Amino acid sequence: MKKIKFSVKFIIPIIFFLCLPVLFAGEGTEEPIFIQTPDVVYVGSPYDIVSQMLHMAGVKKDDLVVDLGCGDARMLVLAAQKYGSKGIGYEIDPVMVRESRKNADRNNVSDLVKIIQADIFTVDISEADVLPIYLLPEMNLRLLPQFETLKPGSRLVFHNYDLFGYIPDKKIEIISNEDNSEHTLWLYTTPLKKAQ
C-alpha cells in the first residue's frame, strides 16, 4: 500500500480557503452569523398593506414594534418614518439581516430600528407593544407561548393567516394597489381570547 505524504505547505492553504466563508460570514455585524435554514421563503408584504397593518394596530411614537422574520425591515422602517416608533426586527437569514440594516440606514432610521439575527422561536418579545405578522399558520401557532408573555394591550396584526383558535378584535379585507390582490388582516389584542 502506498502512503501519501502531505506537506504542511500544502495543507494549511487548503484549510485557510475552506474556512474563509466562516471567517467573513459575520464581517460588519455585531453578532456572530450561524448558518440555519429559514422556515419560510421571504415574501414582503406590499407597502400599502404594511401601512394598513400599522394603522390597524394604532402605532404610536412610544410603541415598540417587533417584527418576527423581518425580511427587509419594511414594517419597522415605515413605522419609524411615519410614527417615530422604535422597532426591533428578528431575522434568521444573514443575507436579509444585512439587507434590512442597509434599508434602515438608507431611510435614515437606523437610530430607531435594530435588526438582530436570531431564530424567532427563541426570542423574548415580552416588551413589544405591536407585532405585525406575516407568517404561515403553523408558525403563528408555534409562537403562542411567546405571545402569552406579552403585556396586556399589546396589538398583533396578522396578514393573510390568522391566529387559528383565537378571536380577533377586528378583521378587514382590502385590495392592494401594488399587486391588485385581496389581502386579509386580523387584529388581536392581548390577553388573547380563545375561541370556545
Image (spheres, rainbow, N blue to C red):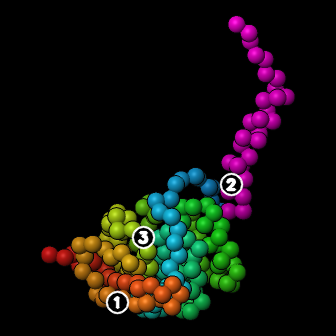
Q: Earlier in the sequence, mark 1 or mark 3?
A: 3
* For the residues bearing labels 3 and 2, Cβ distance under 8 angstroms: no
Q: CA distance from mark 2 to mark 1?
A: 42 Å
**Mark 1 → mark 3, Cα distance in angstroms:** 18 Å
Residue sitting at 76 percent across and 16 percent down?
4
Where is residue 89? Give x, y as percent: 53, 72
Label 3 sits on what residue type?
Answer: Leu
In reply to whether residue 9 is colored magenta, the answer given is yes
Residue hosting label 2:
25
Q: Please state which amino acid type lies under the numbered disc 2.
A: Ala
Quarter in which the N terminus is drawn: top right
Residue at the spot of label 1: 172
Q: Residue furthest top?
A: 1
Residue 110 lies, with reference to residue 90, above or below; the image says below
Rate crowding at label 1 as few (under 14), some (14 to 19) or many (20 or more) other CA atoms within 10 Å: few
Question: Disc 3 to disc 2, how far (Cα)?
Answer: 26 Å
- Quarter where residue 103 is shown: bottom right
Q: Are marks 1 and 3 in contact (CB under 8 Å)?
A: no
Inspect the magenta stretch and tell me whether residue 2 lies in it.
yes
Reply above or below: 10 against 117: above
Q: Position of residue 98 (x, y in %)?
A: 65, 67
Disc 2 vs disc 1: which is toward the camera? 1
| Residue range of the region highlighted in magenta in the rendering | 1-29
